[in-house]
Image (cartoon, helix red, strand yellow):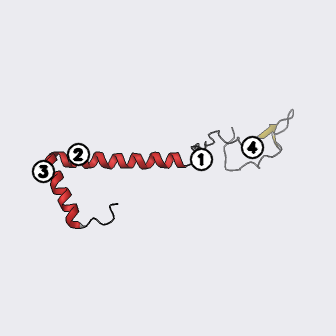
Amino acid sequence: MFGNIGFSELLLIGLIALILFGPHKLPELGRSLGRMVREFKQGARDLLSDDEPARPERKDVTPPAPRPVSQTVEVQTAGAAPQQSQVAGARPADPRRLPD
């Protein structure tokens, strides 16, 4: 239908539009025409797609499980020096660390 419109015909249509609407109203009309075409394309794309709108994937916000705390238990017998006993899964005591 509009396949054989040349540059001179487009120039004539633009000149007539400039005379009819004026230089102030013409950019506003172009913007509204562009929005209308964009909304029409989006609506047609929505109608043609059979997919449901994809839900955004939910992020896991739960904090990670706490690691077992390494503890050193001091066992003191009557009259003897304190002894250190390791709790299962605990790391050995660091000699550079001050006692609690």
According to the image, label 3 marks what residue? 19
Q: Callout 2, which amino acid?
A: Glu
Of the two numbered discs 2 and 4 on the same chain, state the one appearing first in sequence: 2
Residue 51 is marked as 1
Q: Callout 3, which amino acid?
A: Ile
Of the two numbered discs 4 and 1 on the same chain, state the one appearing first in sequence: 1
Seen as rendered, the residue at the extreme right is: 78
Query: Whole-Å distance between the Cαs marked 3 and 4?
Result: 85 Å
- Which type of secondary structure does the marked residue at label 4 adopt? loop
According to the image, label 2 marks what residue? 28
Name above or below for residue 3 compared with residue 84: below
Q: Nearer the viewer, mark 3 or mark 4?
A: 3
* Other residues around mark 3 within 10 Å, as few (<14) / some (14–19) / many (≥20): few
According to the image, label 4 marks what residue? 70
- Which type of secondary structure does the marked residue at label 3 adopt? helix
Query: What is the x, y in percent for residue 6?
Result: 25, 67
Query: Whole-Å distance between the Cαs marked 3 and 1?
Result: 47 Å
Choose between 57 and 73: the one closer to the eye. 57
Of the two numbered discs 3 and 2 on the same chain, state the one appearing first in sequence: 3
Query: Whole-Å distance between the Cαs marked 4 and 1?
Result: 53 Å
Name above or below for residue 24 compared with residue 80: below
Q: Nearer the viewer, mark 3 or mark 2?
A: 3
Query: What is the x, y in percent for residue 91?
Result: 76, 49
